[in-house]
Image: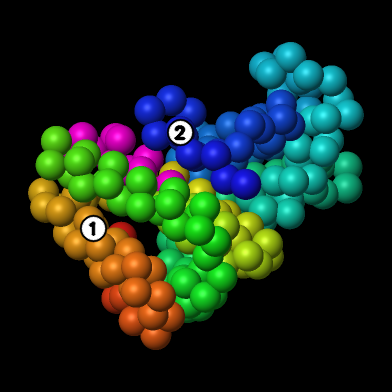
């Protein structure tokens, strides 16, 4: 079950050391600290994170499965990163998958999950008024994570979370409009109201509109 903690540790469940290091290295790649073509030296990762070679090799395999590095014979791990086209493709793929995710979530959401969504949306309204951008970004991610979890399709959930992670860091320098918080609140309100009345068609339409506007904001 998803565990949301808006004020402390984000909405993620507790991560293993391998997961934390994988995420840390992925962020370096996505933000450009580790640029395409750079070799990742296993021993440097061991020294930096205080771990042995065995978990480092598992971490590199995870990064390769994410498409962020390439493991080459006799050369080791080489950074691939994401091109601007890759980012555009991810935005487009999310716009295709998100409406179906919302549709299934409305059809399959449990009472406990919906109570979590109600609480999350209340937080969303409050922090939009206070204009607390950092907390709102965290709460927005939590709201979407509830939807992904409530669709009860592990493959779709993991794909959507991966896309969001990529977009969060690959687009870190995007300048958002001044009214961003209030606009996104209303887009999420349309999705939330579809959950309230259990209308999958309305929810899918609202999700499609939100995904399309998100693509425009990320350009």
Give the residue pinned by disc 1.
184
Boundaries of the magenta span: 131-142
**Helix, strand or loop at disc 1?**
helix
Residue 36: numbered disc: none
Residue at position x 71%, y 30% in the image: 16
Quadrant assignment, res 190: bottom left
User: Residue 102 in the image: x percent, y percent?
Assistant: 46, 71
Q: Pick whichever of labels 2 and 1 is earlier in the sequence.
A: 2
Position of 81 compared to 96: left or right? right
Q: Comparing marks 2 and 1, which lies closer to the viewer?
A: 2
Q: How many marks?
A: 2
User: Residue 166 in the image: x percent, y percent?
Assistant: 50, 52
135 in magenta: yes
Residue at position x 63%, y 57% in the image: 158
Task: Name the chief secondary structure element in magenta.
Answer: helix
The crowd level at tag 2 (other Cα within 10 Å; few <14, some 14-19, many 20+) is some
Residue at position x 27%, y 46% in the image: 122
Q: CA distance from mark 2 to mark 1?
A: 21 Å
In-front residue for pair 87/44: 87
For residue 104, above or below residue 25? below
For residue 43, above or below residue 176? above
User: Residue 54 in the image: x percent, y percent?
Assistant: 88, 29
Give the residue pinned by disc 2.
5
In-front residue for pair 192/48: 192
User: Residue 8 in the image: x percent, y percent?
Assistant: 43, 25
Q: Are marks 2 and 1 in contact (CB under 8 Å)?
A: no
Quadrant location, the C terminus: bottom left
179 in magenta: no
């Amino acid at each position: 079950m998803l565990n949301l903690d808006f004020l402390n540790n984000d909405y993620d469940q507790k991560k293993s050391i391998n997961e934390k290091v994988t995420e840390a290295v992925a962020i370096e790649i996505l933000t450009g600290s580790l640029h395409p073509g750079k070799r990742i030296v296993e021993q440097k990762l061991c020294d930096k994170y205080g771990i042995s070679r065995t978990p480092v090799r598992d971490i590199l395999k995870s990064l390769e499965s994410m498409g962020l590095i390439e493991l080459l014979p006799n050369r080791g791990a080489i950074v691939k990163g994401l091109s601007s086209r890759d980012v555009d493709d991810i935005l487009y793929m999310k716009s295709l998958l998100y409406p179906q995710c919302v549709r299934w979530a409305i059809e399959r959401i449990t009472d406990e999950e919906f109570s979590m969504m109600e609480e999350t949306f209340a937080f969303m309204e409050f922090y939009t008024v206070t204009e607390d951008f950092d907390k709102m970004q965290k709460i927005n991610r939590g709201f979407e994570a509830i939807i992904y979890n409530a669709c009860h399709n592990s493959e779709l959930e993991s794909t959507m979370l991966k896309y969001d992670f990529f977009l969060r860091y690959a687009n870190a320098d995007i300048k958002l409009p001044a009214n961003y918080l209030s606009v996104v609140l209303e887009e999420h309100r349309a999705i939330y109201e579809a959950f309230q009345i259990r209308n999958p068609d309305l929810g899918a339409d609202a999700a499609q509109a939100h995904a399309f506007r998100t693509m425009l904001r990320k350009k």
